[in-house]
Image (tube, rainbow, N blue to C red):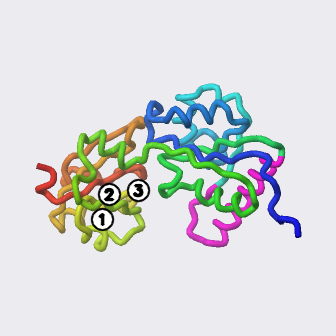
Amino acid sequence: MEDSKREPAGILYGVGTGPGDPELLTLKAVRILREADVIGIPSTKKEGCKAWQIAVQAVPEIEKKETLFVSFPMSRDPAVLERAHQEGAMQTAKLLDQGKSIAFLTLGDPSVYSTYCYLQKQIQNMGYGTVMVSGVPSFCAAAARLGISLGEQGEALHILPGSYPLEAGLGFSGTRVLMKSGKQIGAVKERLLAENCSSKMVENCGMPGERVIRRTEDIPEDAGYYSLIIVKDKEKWD
């Protein structure tokens, strides 16, 4: 019986662009971007796509390459998301069938809350080859910007998305990283103050408009989507 999976004609690369500073792209990411036939971006246009803006500063020649636009709607409707993922996979597969390699851009690292992972699953299920190219995660870049350690010796490290129940997350021991709190930032600040938590925040790390906040009391309630808060026990900051 013949294998129902076709031989992959091209390879899909999920390329992490890091959090914002183009100098944080890895040498491997730069090489893949230069060698790829097509640049994929998680948007319907280049303008406003953070991953594209970072990558094109590091590798200007991608501006001349063929571009694959894949829409990832900001929706919680499973049917809407599934339809978008399937459409994106079909667009991608057409190019792979032409023998083209695709470097698909994603902020930070492709293995950490990235849109790329949804596309990768679809493409793998269709029998094509995929490769992840690691990027600097936002929480590592933010810690470096603050000049602090995320974990020492046996200290636990918890990475929590903005949708995670805050009360439960703050109950964990060790370092807690709160990612993409977005519109909930006011409530997050209020809870941190109520729990007497010691925290620091970096907004738009490595991007234009970067802000570094070193006290919970100073966290701005108008902070944007790319705001990352690091919470530790007070004695750990000493």
Q: Residue at x 49, y 58 (%)?
A: 113
Task: Specify the segment rendered in magenta.
Answer: 72-97
Q: Amino acid at mark 3?
A: Lys
Task: Name the residue that disc number 1 marks.
Answer: 187
Q: Earlier in the sequence, mark 3 or mark 1?
A: 3
> In x, y percent, where is residue 124?
69, 59
Q: How far apart in space, not on screen, are marks 3 and 2 (Cα)?
A: 10 Å
Question: In this view of the protein, which residue sits in the foreground, 72 or 35?
Answer: 35
For label 2, the SS is: strand
Task: Name the residue that disc number 2 marks.
Answer: 177
Task: Give residue 101's quadrant in the image.
Answer: top right
Q: Earlier in the sequence, mark 1 or mark 2?
A: 2
Q: Residue at x 77, y 53 (%)?
A: 93
Say few, some or many: other residues with alpha carbon within 10 Å of mark 1 (under 14 / 14 to 19 / 20 or more): few
Q: Determine whether, in the image, residue 171 is placed left or right of residue 129.
A: left
Asked if the stretch drawn in magenta spans residue 75, the answer is: yes
Question: In this view of the protein, which residue sits in the foreground, 216 or 55?
Answer: 55
Say few, some or many: other residues with alpha carbon within 10 Å of mark 3 (under 14 / 14 to 19 / 20 or more): many
Residue 60 sits above or below residue 220 on the image: above
Mark in front: 3 vs 2: 2
Asked if the stretch drawn in magenta spans residue 45, the answer is: no
Q: Amino acid at mark 2?
A: Val
